[in-house]
Amino acid sequence: MSDGAQFDGAVTRQYEIELLLQAQLDDARLLQELSARLIQHHGASDIYDQFVDAAIALMHSDFGSMQMLRRDDSGDERLELIAERAFIPEAAEFWHWVASGEGSVCGLAMAAGARVVIEDVDAEPAMRGTPDLDMYHLAGMVSMQSTPLRSRTGLPLGMISTHWREPHTPS
């Protein structure tokens, strides 16, 4: 094969990769926008379940959840679990309310105000010694990501998260 043909093949492959990545980014943006719109308008819980199912399908994950930013009984602003898939009951109860900065991936993302990806909980320094690490082990969750949901004006509304049973690097 000539050098020119190899170069053309490499350029074509790079273009295909860029198209695939753009499509995945477009899917993630659509899911984030729709989720934020639903949370902002306090949609029905079955719709939240559908979005968690869509997130799991798009991310090829084993678990998923959606949380809404609310005030708890003490008046503190926290994430409240409003939909989940494949969580064991103990995990759903444990993460029903999550504060900013807590050891969970969603607590870390809330504190950072940005998406947080943990490829392997056992290798993540922020997880060491936390009750969240113990719950991740019990629930069978090894890798995870949490993405903040924001209104069109940038106000935080909640979080959408996906989790995997094996170490994973989401696209």
Image (cartoon, rainbow, N blue to C red):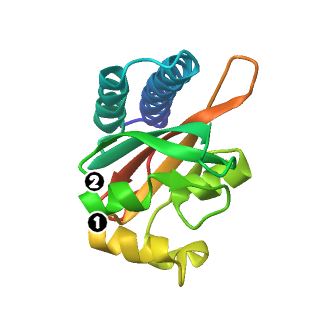
Q: Is residue 36 above or below residue 98?
A: above
Q: Is residue 165 visible?
A: no
Horizontal and vertical percent position of residue 61 = 30, 46
Q: Is residue 160 visible?
A: yes
Q: Residues within 10 Å of mark 1 (few under 14, many from 20)?
A: some
Horizontal and vertical percent position of residue 168 = 38, 58
Q: CA distance from mark 1 to mark 2?
A: 7 Å
Horizontal and vertical percent position of residue 49 = 31, 29
For label 2, the SS is loop
Residue tagged by mark 2? 87
Of the two numbered discs 1 and 2 on the same chain, state the one appearing first in sequence: 2
Report the quarter where the N terminus lies: top left
Count of numbered circles in the view: 2
Q: Amino acid at mark 2?
A: Phe
Q: Is residue 52 above or below residue 90?
A: above
Q: Please give the name of the residue rendered at 62% of the width and 48% of the height, measured from the top-left corner.
A: 78
- For the view shown, which residue lies furthest in the front direction? 73
Residue tagged by mark 1? 139
Query: In this rendering, would 108 be left or right of 25?
Result: right
Label for residue 121? none
Q: Nearer the viewer, residue 93 or 163?
A: 93
- For the view shown, which residue lies furthest in the bottom direction? 129
Q: Nearer the viewer, residue 167 or 2?
A: 167
Horizontal and vertical percent position of residue 71 = 64, 41
Q: Please give the name of the residue rendered at 59% of the width and 48% of the height, measured from the top-left corner.
A: 73
Query: In this rendering, would 4 be left or right of 167?
Result: right
Q: Amino acid at mark 1?
A: Ala
Q: Please give the name of the residue rendered at 40% of the width and 77% of the height, measured from the top-left corner.
A: 134
Q: Disc 1 vs disc 2: Cβ atoms closer than 8 Å? A: yes
Q: Please give the name of the residue rendered at 67% of the width and 21% of the height, measured from the top-left corner.
A: 151
